[in-house]
Image: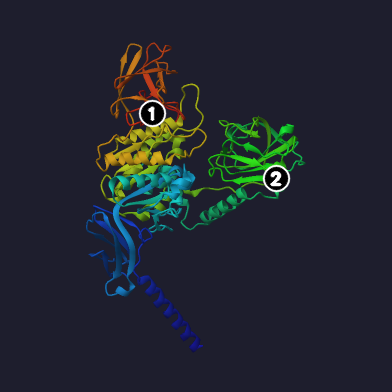
Amino acid sequence: MRCRIRTSLLFFAALFISQTFIYAQVSLPHVFGDSMVLQRGVKIPVWGNSSPGALIVAKLGNVRATAKADHLGKWQLRFPVFKAGGPYVLEVAESGKPDLAIKLKGILIGDVWLASGQSNMEWQVQQAKDAGKEIANANFPQVRFLVVEHSKQVKPQTNISAGKWKVCDTGNVKEFSAVAYYFARKIHRDQKVPVGIIQSTWGGTPIEAWTSREMLLTSPITREKTLSNDTLAPDREDFVQDSLNQIRLWNMVYNPQNNADKIVPAVEYDDADWTTVEMPNVLKDFGIGYYEGVVWLKRKITLPPSFNQKDITINLGHPEMNYSLYFNGQEICKNVWYSNATHAYTIPANMVKSGENTIAVRIAMLWGGGGLSPLDDIYIADGSSKISLKGKWIYKKDLEGALPKILNYQYYPTVLFNTMINPVIPFGIKGFIWYQGEANAAAAYDYRTLFPMLIADWRKRWRQGDLPFLFVQLANYMKTKPLPSESEWAELREAQTLTLSQPNTGMACVIDIGEANDIHPKNKQEVGRRLALVANKMVYKQACIASGPRYKNYKKEGNRIRISFTNIGTGLSTKDGKEVAGFAIAGKDKQFYWAKAIIEGNEVIIYADKVAEPVAVRYAWADNPECNLINSANLPAVPFRTDEWKGITQK
């Protein structure tokens, strides 16, 4: 018995010693790594863990810095200011333990930008315009990216869950943020310095998720919802279960259940009880309300003898969400909805017959979306003739069972700040680039408060003063409406423009490069370029025109209103060379009508025959406005209104 006790004591002593030794090793958080970029022109912070009370000795190149760990083993030191250059090696060790030093290689000194926001900032180079060409030409060894892995917690973390600095080349660039890459590429070319991007993004997320708890508690808009997070715990089962449910959901989206792909598309399948719907159409117009699940669509089409045993093309326009296409029971494609620029497919001749043929489409309806865009043509063609697929289709939902309910904890207040922002503070940076707002459009008026809160929050925590904060205004999206109307997206854009009253902020307007049927416009090159223009002027003090015309003031002249602008360059014109479009005018009755707009020098004269006594003008005030006013740099005029009438998102 005594021998067994002694053996146990020896085992636990050895375990304690080994654990103490492991804990004693100096360590750095994942934000530091080989090939990283460190910020020039500031004292460079480096931090980590070690033995409590240990003296930490670090060298960056030939420059030495020291710090003493506190009673918990936490330490932080700062190197003096460096100029742009490199490569350098960073060595960090406890004093007297040089053989246990951490050595990070290939480090450059340049400008580091934190890129954050939701899906339009997260959208990858491989998903955007001219992906193949851009990837093939992406050889920029002095541009480096750290993509922070998705993670969510209800308590602030000190380390990101995962992420590794990568050099920008054809092998790595495809998964980088397209907006951030095109921004970094232009800054690198223009400023001739290395550029590092810390990419911390998550699609679909609201601004509250990226803001600290302390800041959210200061506003009545967010206080109650933030306090409700206190019922959650960092390691609760619901976080784990939600992640497992997401895995199960995507498995069901990609893989038909119950052999549905073998049964449902078959020509002989009994679909007599299916519901008729006009196509092309999207889920919100099916008349079934909000729905998440798999929907099957079918259409029988009669083909003439000229189509018999010929290769034909089927074009689905622009489907929303993940889908699969079947022809006469055979699978033609299985597609991720954003992966193709076009959705036209060849049906092999041996599957085509004259007379009746059956088309089936399986679509995963997610986030309240899904269907075939009503803005696009859908058809079958044999090269010389085309048969429209518009008209009556039939559909059936719930053939494969319900998708698991996802609680999406990443949407909760502060959870992404805790895991994807807080752990990289106080890494030295040049500034922030931000593309977000779609998820807050339904409460756009609150964004007037929430956006400045986030900016102030991040600046306060970085302790580098009023760091430059550059952001993208929401692009045009959704159907173009025939008459002037209210718009949540217009109000969100206005909230973004109002944020320019905050110091050291800049905005890239992209009201002219969106896509009606895609919330993720493909032309990310121009988005990145316009952000870089703002940086060049505001941050790097270059003489350039960085934004389009901005509303300055107005003056009434009888039945007309004269609008003055800033940022006109050498003059105003229209993008397409046609008459000015996008202006609406109203009298005291608040009824807006499309207006005639005439460029006169550096101003625009607005009037409408139906408005004898105008009091208000709006420009590009819509989800997807038809607007064409530009300055001499071909940059679009920023949407605006002269009135302060209560909007549809103001409570």
Quadrant where the image shows the C terminus: top left
Q: Nearer the viewer, residue 147 or 527?
A: 527
Identified at 56% across, 45% down, the residue is 336
- Sequence-first disc among 1 and 2: 2
Is residue 511 visible to the viewer in this orientation of the structure? yes
Q: Position of residue 62 (x, y in %)?
A: 23, 65
Q: In the image, what residue type sits under mark 1?
A: Pro
User: What residue did someone put label 2 on?
Assistant: 330
Residues packed near mark 2 inside 10 Å, few (<14), some (14 to 19) or many (20 plus): some
Q: What numbered label is drawn on residue 639?
A: 1
> In terms of secondary structure, where does tag 2 sit?
strand
Q: Position of residue 446 (x, y in %)?
A: 40, 36
Camera-side mark, 1 or 2: 2
> In terms of secondary structure, where does tag 1 sit?
loop
Instruction: Name the image quarter holding residue 511.
Output: top left
Q: In the image, what residue type sits under mark 2?
A: Gln
92 displayed left or right of 445: left
268 displayed left or right of 450: right
Distance from disc 1 to disc 2, alpha carbons, whole Å, reads 48 Å
265 displayed left or right of 234: right
* As drawn, 327 above or below 23: above
